[in-house]
Amino acid sequence: MMGQQGINHVLAVHIRTYGCQMNVRDSEAIGALLVRQGYRLTEREDEADVILINTCSVRGKAEDKAVGKLRLMGVEKRERPHLIVGAVGCMVQRIGREALKRIDGLDFAVGTHRLSALPAVIEAIRAGRGPIVDVGEEETEPEALAGHLSGQVLAFVNILLGCDRHCAYCIVPTVRGREWSRPAESIMREIGALAGDGVKEVTLLGQSVMSYGRANVVYPEAHVSRHGFMEALPRLLEEVSGVPGIQRVRFTSGHPSGCTEELARAMGELKGVCDHLHLPVQSGSDRILKAMRRGYTAETYLAAVARLRASVPSLALTSDVIVGFPGETEADFEQTRLLMDAAGFDNAYIFKYSPREGTPAASMVDDVTPDEKMRRNHVLLEDQDRRGLDLNRVLVGKVVEVLTEGPSLRNQDRWAGRTTTSKITIFEPRAAIKAGDTVKVLVERVGPQTLYGSVVGEDGI
Ligand code: SAH
Ligand code: SF4
Ligand code: F3S
């Protein structure tokens, strides 16, 4: 298969990813698939034979970034005529053939449902049969995308594909299709293999992950688990946390309607399930929540939080918020500030509303000015920094357990890992520590999102 550049030349693929954890996971799966076909992966753009850009569509800016990058790569082809440039993912699924018009030099565009066709597509391009656009709706062999790259401490595992919620602002249901839950058995097979490969922590992924098992059957028979769970997600959490070698389990993203008593109990009782949940709130104003079609009010959101905290007192909560949704007034915005305080978020991602063509919100008037969106964005970020710092300060002088991930990105002399509450923790390494070890760290100082300290013990010390 390795024609053109000579028989011994192994083609190098560089993959760059925009967007959410689901895209990160897709990129890894594509990488693993291509490695199985005889390609190698490279971090370096300049030595790549194939450059793949995995695109996100969630906000206008996310698309602009990916298009900008792809155009640059298209220009690069003038110097490197054999270079193959392809776009995959959510934006491709949304715009289809239009991608070829927008991006000069693009060899192929493959949508979210067709990723397993990539090896064949690349082969066809190499044989001169391009450009190719494949955005079919019919899923190509989801199990072909269950592979992982080896040597990792953390892994993402898809449990729920697509989304049926249709929040008024959101493009995800359009680009990711209908909700579909993977059968528990195939998820467990994937996680068993990961454990065998040394993975210590898995994050179960779904856009609205608590809908797991709702649209289709995931367990062949009704059954009460050892812990007495009957709902699909608690059952799965119980199974995953029982896999030898898997020390931690996370799942994301949550929705208040899925925060049942049983799920709260699972989070409290199952030792491996982390004390952290990402529970996007989007707004604290009931009027805006209704216009967003989120399906809860500020009160029911806080009731869900209370249910979880009753079972997991040390729970850390993170969230997403949109500022400047159509019609959002100053009073609505103040409600959001209040709710963020009441919920006590450890961290929050703030987004400026961006109309997405074809969504219900796109036909509403985008009446909050860009300057005002920017201002609201800043206010919430400042609030969050203060809140994050206050919550972290109580940890100074305490010992936290950290799963080490490797050298810190900012300063290679230090190491980084996370607590069960998902706080990034930076510490001075000791000689014998390796990625994947669990260490005890004495917290000496904190920032709004980070803990700093020194190692006082290892696994069980
Ligand atoms: N499935 C996840 C979110 C996926 S998108 C969930 O529902 O929790 C990640 C975040 O992007 C959303 O939570 C929302 O805050 C933000 N977002 C989505 N569409 C947006 C839009 N049109 N404009 C601005 N932010 C948006
Ligand atoms: Fe989008 Fe809502 Fe689905 Fe999240 S739950 S992906 S915000 S439609
Ligand atoms: Fe973006 Fe697609 Fe994720 S639109 S947020 S990469 S599901």
Image (spheres, helix red, strand yellow):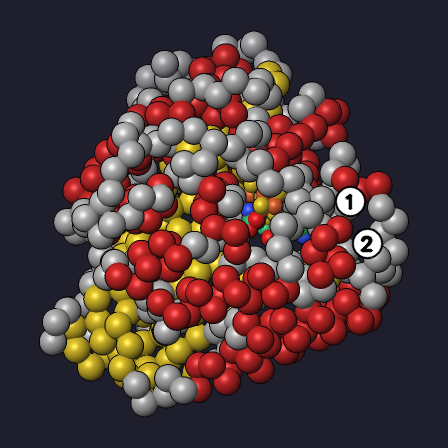
Q: Position of residue 165 (x, y in %)?
A: 60, 40
Q: Position of residue 313 (x, y in %)?
A: 37, 73
**Relative vertical location of residue 199 with respect to residue 80 in this rendering, above or below:** below
Question: Residue 261 got which mark?
Answer: none
Disc 2 Cβ-to-ligand 1 distance below 8 Å: no
> Could you say which is closer to the camera, residue 339 or residue 87?
339
The kind of secondary structure element at disc 1 is helix
Q: Are marks 1 and 2 in contact (CB under 8 Å)?
A: yes
Disc 1 Cβ-to-ligand 1 distance below 8 Å: yes
The kind of secondary structure element at disc 2 is loop
> At label 1, which amino acid type do we have?
Ala
Residue 105 can be seen in this image: no
Residue for point 49% across, 72% down: 346
Q: Residues within 10 Å of mark 1 (few under 14, many from 20)?
A: many
Is 121 placed left or right of 460 in the picture?
right
> Could you say which is closer to the camera, residue 176 or residue 314?
314
Is 143 placed left or right of 241 in the picture?
right
**Relative vertical location of residue 14 with respect to residue 312 in this rendering, above or below:** above
Q: Which residue lies under the disc numbered 2?
A: 326
Residue for point 32% across, 89% down: 397
Q: Which residue lies under the disc numbered 1?
A: 361
